Image: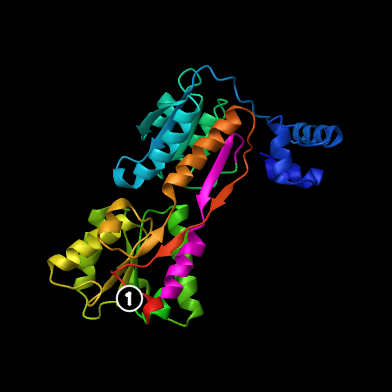
Amino acid sequence: MAGIRDIARRAGVSISTVSNVLHNKKSASDATREKILEIAAELGYEIPSVKKKSTLTVICNISDFDALYYLDILHGISDFLNSKGYSMLICTGENFTRYSDPEVVCGCIVNDVKTKDADIESVAKKGIPVIVLDREIECRGVKSIVVNNYAAEKQLIDGLIEAGYEKFAFLAGLNTADNKDRYAAFRDSLKEHDIPFSRTDYHEGDWREKSGAQAARILMLSEDMPQILVCANDMMALGAIRMFKQNGLKVPDDIAVAGFDDIIVSRYTELTTVTVPDYERGYLAAQALVGILEEKGDYDTVRIGARVKWRKTTKDFRKI
């Protein structure tokens, strides 16, 4: 099926111009608008229509296994929605598609890695605008707000190498876009500095603290432990630290640990991590959704930055 990119290519205009025309925004000349609509019809592209909202309730779809991670995001979403007179319904898992009905909600914000793209697309096809925070989906009616995971993770690994670390282990999360970007940055940084990395030092987790503890147990069985364990998120990093300490290892003297996300607990446990502006991206997600509902927004992808927070579970290259 033809997509927005195909129409933009044929029309010789930007993707955002096509998106605005298809969503009835007054941002293109009449001639350009007519040309885009003509090409869309030729390619069999079904022009989306956002149904007039009969409710002011927004559904927020989150995972059911990591409440700490979502607190700041939900806080940001709630603050903006409340300021505009909207209410928020929180759900997990399959309840997302169950409650995503035009008579129940006027829009959706999705931050559950287990929610399938197909389910998100099916909701958008009902005329309900969807904002996704954890991936990019090229689908009419869906807008993505994503963190630049690669740049932030690259900055972290470059700094660790500068601090003198040479033997790394990596603990991955589930097979998501976030995990892929973080691991790609990890590998690229090691490669650029000619630091070898064996696949045996790659461990698989599931984002949860328990999988971090299990990875730590496995690492402690080795006669040649890494100098540092880099985890794809904070929950796994915290689980690993707990297990190391229970077995008499000192962090970072015996083994260093780094994470990603900077959840609330990480700030009290002095975990080196990447700070993601979760409150702000929740606020931006709600702002983007309301903009679309009130016909003032667009569906262009938004990318936000993140930065490294150096704490006591690693050596800080800036102090060497």
Which part of the image, by quadrant, shows the C terminus? bottom left
- SS class of the residue under badge 1? loop
Extreme right residue here?
31
Above or below residue 231? Residue 220 is below
Q: Amino acid at mark 1?
A: Lys
Residue at mark 1: 315
The foreground one among 81 and 216 is 81
* Magenta segment: 139-159
Q: Is residue 146 magenta?
A: yes
In the displayed structure image, the side of residue 124 where residue 49 appears, left or right: right
Q: Quadrant of residue 60?
A: top left
At a point 31% along the width and 73% down the height, the residue shown is 228
| Residue 246 x/y as whole percent | 13, 65
In the displayed structure image, the side of residue 278 where residue 123 appears, left or right: right
| Residue 68 x/y as whole percent | 30, 46
Q: Quadrant of residue 223?
A: bottom left
Residue 66 visible? The answer is no
| Residue 105 x/y as whole percent | 47, 23
Q: Is residue 12 magenta?
A: no
